Image (cartoon, rainbow, N blue to C red):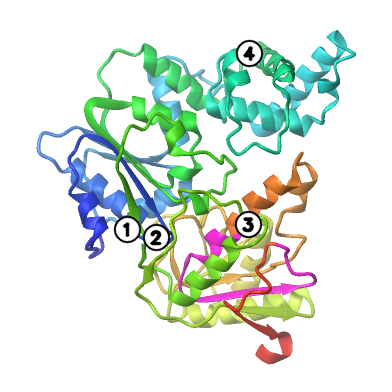
Amino acid sequence: MMLGIKPTGKQEEVMALPANGHTVVLGTAGSGKTTIALLRAHHLASIPNGGKVLLVTFNGALVEYMRGISSTKPRKLVVENYHKFARGYLNSRGKMPSRNGILGPEEKAYYIEQAVVVLKTQYPNESTFRRPKEFFIEEITFIEKFGFASITEYKEAERIGRASSNIKRENRKWIFAVYEKYIELRKDIGRKYDWDDLAFYVVNELQDDNGVRRYSHIIVDEGQDFSPMMIKSLVQAVAEDGSFTFFGDVAQQIYGSRLSWRDSGVDTNKIWRFDMNYRNPISITAFAKAITENEYWRQDGDMIEATAQIAEGPKPILVKFSSKSSEMAWVVERAIATGKTSSTVIVCRNRADIDDFLPVLKNKGCVAIEINKETPGFAHLKKVYLTTYHAAKGLEFDNVFIPYMTDDKLPDPDTVSSAVYKEVIYADEIKLLYVAATRSKYGLYMTYSGTLSPLFPKDSVSYDFYNEEDVV
């Protein structure tokens, strides 16, 4: 049973689609994609004599939210994130080492660097090997996410979202050589996979697997964050007479894949477009549109703009403070006040910021709930929540506070300093602001002290600006 949610318009049409074939649903923020994904999953899992249903998403916090907003779950419905699905499938085929066998990001960077060192020694005059290690990490991740199994495939690949990585075709052989050496070094220490190529091996295994598929229906939520190989593996994991449904919003693509569902084996001529915003008032939607007009935003033909909203609300506000301490004090005080009568969230850049806020809230008698993949329940209660930009994806709150809107937080300086191409990072980071802002069903309060983030739409009329003395 879902919490009194009734689909309307295009939502209802998607709910009524037959239980076979491929369906793509693209929607704007607040258009009910996650809700309809969950409702469709419940519907398919309740078909008499029907098969099992997998509802898969990218982040763990959203998995818990989906579990929470449903008071009962059909026996045939499984809700989990992609990596759990992938590990489970490879394990069922005897292909997952007992001690995990997945290389973490830091180890991955180390072994890619070692691969470059080996090849640089063998080919001391090749200039490609003089590029920074970050370049090779980015490029090898690109190879993994698109599943290029040979130098020929890699050479001929279109540079989807990678125009700034200007590599001559004749030099790609050197990068692929680093990739192959990295795989070799990784295997030597008993690591068969890393988190970015897990899906590639799932695809290969499924192609050799003639057994009955476990799932008759697979539904992907927040599909824009999945790599082409992830989506391809899920398409192949569906029973032959079953269904695959993809829900996504390219405006909220926050994991840097810059890909299209079109590159991933999805076979459909019909695209459903959810352009009605049921969550955000007109004032929030106007601010979100201003974010997409920033010079760092990358336009995409699959982006859906809201054509209508059903809610009214106040303009978002931006407040400048004289110090970080006075900023935090104001955010805490206001969040506690709104949390007494509505669901309220403070969206932070990282865990360290959450750890700063938690004790201050507690000292004021407020036991705030941190949202992460272990959080039970869901985020619609009259309480104060804390979360990061990434974990906020797919959630909604009455009031949203975004503190520390400064140039030393957004874009993240560590990410920028290690990047090969700054504009690529800026394009990724601005989407975090878009995601955070569009969580709000009513109030949006943004604050900073110091220098305002270059990603903020500072010349827009879509928000009201105040100095500290105006609000304290």
Dot 2: element:
loop
Q: Which mark is residue 69?
A: 1
Q: Which mark is residue 119?
A: none
Which residue range is magenta in the image? 433-454
Instruction: Give the residue type at disc 4.
Output: Lys
Q: Is residue 126 visible?
A: yes
Instruction: Give the residue type at disc 1.
Output: Ile
Q: Residue at x 21, y 34 (%)?
A: 20
* Crowd tier of the residue under label 4, counting other residues whose Cα lies within 10 Å: few below 14, some 14–19, many 20 or above: few
Q: Which mark is residue 378?
A: 2
Instruction: Give the residue type at disc 3.
Output: Ile
Q: Earlier in the sequence, mark 3 or mark 1?
A: 1
Quadrant for residue 278, please give it. Answer: bottom left
Q: Check contact, mark 1 vs mark 2: CB within 8 A.
A: yes
Q: Which mark is residue 187?
A: 4
* Distance Cα–Cα, label 4 vs label 1: 42 Å
Instruction: Give the residue type at disc 2.
Output: Phe
Dot 4: element:
helix
Compared to 343, does 108 lie above or below? above
Q: Residue at x 21, y 53 (%)?
A: 13
Task: Please state the horizontal and vertical placement of residue 196, each as a whole percent of the image.
Answer: 57, 30
Q: Nearer the viewer, mark 3 or mark 4?
A: 3
Residue picked out by circle 3: 430
Say if the magenta span includes residue 368.
no
The residue nearer to you, when weighing 330 against 55, is 55
